[in-house]
Image (cartoon, rainbow, N blue to C red):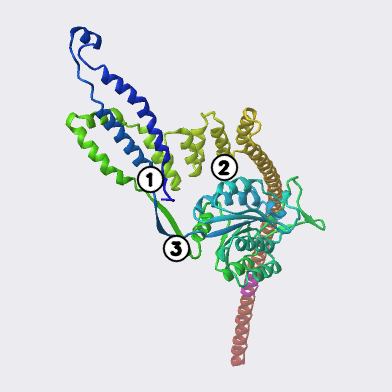
């Protein structure tokens, strides 16, 4: 009996109503006669003494019921426990290259958002946090409280790093140390970085050699890269040339392939986060029984007291005491249920399961409805739901919805309004600085695009003028060429006409000369023939 204890000792508070009710019942029993005692004495009538045993029976039954509900326990039972205590360490890059803007608004902001989105997915096991720049630093040891990490991640930036640089191998080495220190021989390392050099990759693989830790990488950036715009607006340069930060996929894959992890490129959707979370949510050896993992659960033996309680209840059935006690003492709930409470409770369960769209439809509470719409990335609906609410939490979520939608001016105005009501709202101050920086970058980008557009329009106008001038020159040349061809054609036609007339005249002259020659010859021949004939006739005559 050394281990005897009560599992639910708060039930002993139920003796208080008994202490109050017993004197009242006793006094009522004494004054329950039809004739007052002093009148009965004058009349010489005797009254029967009130029966005390029903009150004692009620008190005994009450005592037994309270003790039974308190859960007396003097035994323990052993239950097998399964080892589901997986471990993982989130390693975040805090080098200056995370200020690059190839993913909007920049890599650092997206890295924080992605890290915060991963935390709710890790429901089993423990998670640690490491940040690195020139060296690796422990931000939080392995913990099952994700809210601790949720409060630390937004405050991480390259400005808080003691040593500048981009040494991912140091961050991986620090993650290995945390896992070994917690006694985990297996685990996951989730590396969020914008690239690794081949030298750093070789060093990281050397640290991972001989271990059973798998490294999964979420690449924050693009292979095209972008200049690194520092918080003061200037560009990070080397020897007067802006530094362009790019991602080498092959180097990153060499680490994930060697350790059995996965590689994901940062996306505008949650597909990258969901892939990492689903891959690392379960520990590597989940479901194995621990060597000495047994839970000793106490056995509630209060059910044995139900037997004497039932025997006492049988004595009360004769006069309806049990039924009266049931209707008087037992709490009876109203038949009319509260649909508001039930609906929101079901919606909250849907929300905790991660089905935010359905939860947003089920919630009748506008605060929770707006939160569910925000988590479902329905930012316009969240703004419409949260805008009429004036409590600080709803106003803070409203500013976040404006920021996610890209309306940085309205988000800043909402945060400023909230800070007037609560100047010590640290998260609102931090988000205000973020959206102001994002609005500044957006304006700079807009001005740059407008400048490029103007230059493009000027170039198009110059090309148009040149094209018009070229077309006019070609037109003039064409007209001149057509006029020259026309003149030449006219001259050629005139020459041909003159030549034709001259040829016709020459042919005519030649024809006339030939006809005249033939005529002369004919006349000469006829004259010759005539002379010969006369000479012949004269000869014949002679």
Q: Is residue 220 magenta?
A: no
User: Where does the magenta region start and end?
Assistant: 507-515
Q: Are marks 1 and 2 in contact (CB under 8 Å)?
A: no
Say left or right for 209 vs 326: right
Q: x, y (%) of residue 123?
A: 49, 53
Q: How far apart are the alpha carbons under marks 3 and 2?
A: 39 Å
Which tag, 1 or 2, sits closer to the chain's start?
Answer: 1
Q: Is residue 514 magenta?
A: yes
Q: Residue at x 34, y 48 (%)?
A: 301
Label 3 residue SS: loop
Q: Residues within 10 Å of mark 2 (few under 14, many from 20)?
A: some
Q: Which mark is residue 404?
A: 2
Q: Which mark is residue 72?
A: 1
Q: Residue 17 is drawn in which quadrant?
A: top left
Say left or right for 336 vs 295: left
Which tag, 3 or 2, sits closer to the chain's start?
Answer: 3
The residue singled out by tag 3 in the image is: 287
Q: x, y (%) of residue 198?
A: 69, 69
Number of numbered discs: 3
Q: How far apart are the alpha carbons under marks 1 and 2?
A: 55 Å
For marks 1 and 2, give the one nearer the viewer: 1
User: Which one is in front, 323 or 179?
Assistant: 323
Q: How far apart are the alpha carbons under marks 1 and 3?
A: 34 Å
User: Which one is in front, 238 or 292?
Assistant: 292
Q: x, y (%) of residue 237?
A: 78, 55
């Amino acid at each position: 009996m050394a281990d005897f204890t009560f599992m639910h000792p708060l039930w002993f508070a139920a003796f208080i109503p008994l202490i109050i009710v017993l004197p009242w019942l006793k006094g009522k029993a004494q004054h329950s006669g039809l004739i007052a005692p002093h009148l009965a004495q004058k009349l010489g009538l005797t009254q029967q003494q009130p029966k005390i045993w029903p009150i004692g029976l009620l008190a005994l039954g009450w005592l037994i019921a309270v003790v039974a509900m308190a859960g007396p326990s003097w035994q323990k039972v052993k239950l097998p426990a399964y080892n589901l205590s997986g471990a993982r360490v989130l390693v975040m890059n805090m080098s200056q290259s995370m200020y690059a803007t190839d993913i909007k608004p920049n890599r650092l902001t997206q890295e924080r958002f992605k890290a915060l989105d991963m935390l709710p997915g890790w429901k089993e096991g423990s998670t640690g946090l490491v940040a690195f720049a020139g060296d690796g630093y422990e931000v939080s040891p392995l913990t099952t409280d994700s809210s601790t990490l949720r409060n630390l991640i937004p405050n991480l930036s390259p400005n808080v790093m003691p040593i500048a640089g981009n040494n991912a191998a140091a961050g991986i080495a620090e993650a290995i140390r945390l896992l070994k220190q917690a006694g985990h021989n297996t685990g996951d390392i989730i590396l969020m970085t914008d690239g690794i050099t081949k030298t750093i990759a070789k060093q990281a693989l050397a640290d991972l050699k001989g271990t059973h830790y798998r490294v999964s990488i979420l690449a924050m950036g693009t292979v095209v890269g972008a200049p690194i715009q520092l918080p003061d607006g200037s560009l990070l340069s080397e020897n007067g040339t802006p530094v362009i930060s790019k991602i080498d996929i092959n180097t990153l894959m060499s680490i994930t392939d060697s350790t059995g992890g996965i590689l994901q490129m940062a996306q505008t959707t949650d597909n990258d986060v969901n892939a990492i979370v689903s891959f690392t949510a379960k520990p590597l050896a989940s479901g194995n029984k621990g060597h000495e993992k047994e839970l000793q659960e106490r056995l509630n033996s209060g059910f044995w007291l139900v037997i004497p309680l039932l025997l006492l209840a049988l004595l009360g059935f004769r006069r309806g005491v049990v039924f009266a006690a049931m209707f008087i003492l037992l709490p009876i709930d109203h038949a009319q249920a509260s649909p508001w409470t039930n609906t929101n409770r079901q919606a909250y369960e849907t929300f905790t399961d991660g089905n935010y769209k359905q939860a947003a439809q089920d919630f009748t509470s506008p605060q929770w409805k707006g939160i569910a719409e925000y988590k479902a990335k329905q930012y316009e609906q969240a703004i419409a739901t949260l805008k009429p609410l004036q409590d600080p939490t709803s106003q803070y979520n409203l500013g976040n919805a404006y920021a996610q939608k890209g309306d940085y001016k309205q988000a800043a105005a909402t945060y400023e309004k909230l800070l007037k009501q609560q100047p010590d709202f640290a998260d609102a101050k931090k988000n205000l600085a973020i959206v102001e920086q994002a609005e500044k970058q957006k304006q700079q980008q807009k001005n740059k695009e407008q400048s490029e557009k103007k230059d493009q329009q000027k170039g198009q106008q110059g090309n148009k003028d040149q094209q018009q001038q070229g077309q006019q020159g070609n037109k003039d040349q064409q007209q001149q060429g057509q006029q020259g061809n026309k003149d030449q054609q006219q001259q050629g036609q005139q020459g041909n006409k003159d030549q034709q007339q001259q040829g016709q005249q020459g042919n005519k002259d030649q024809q006339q000369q030939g006809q005249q020659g033939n005529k002369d010859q004919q006349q000469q021949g006829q004259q010759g023939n005539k002379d010969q004939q006369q000479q012949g006739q004269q000869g014949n005559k002679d």
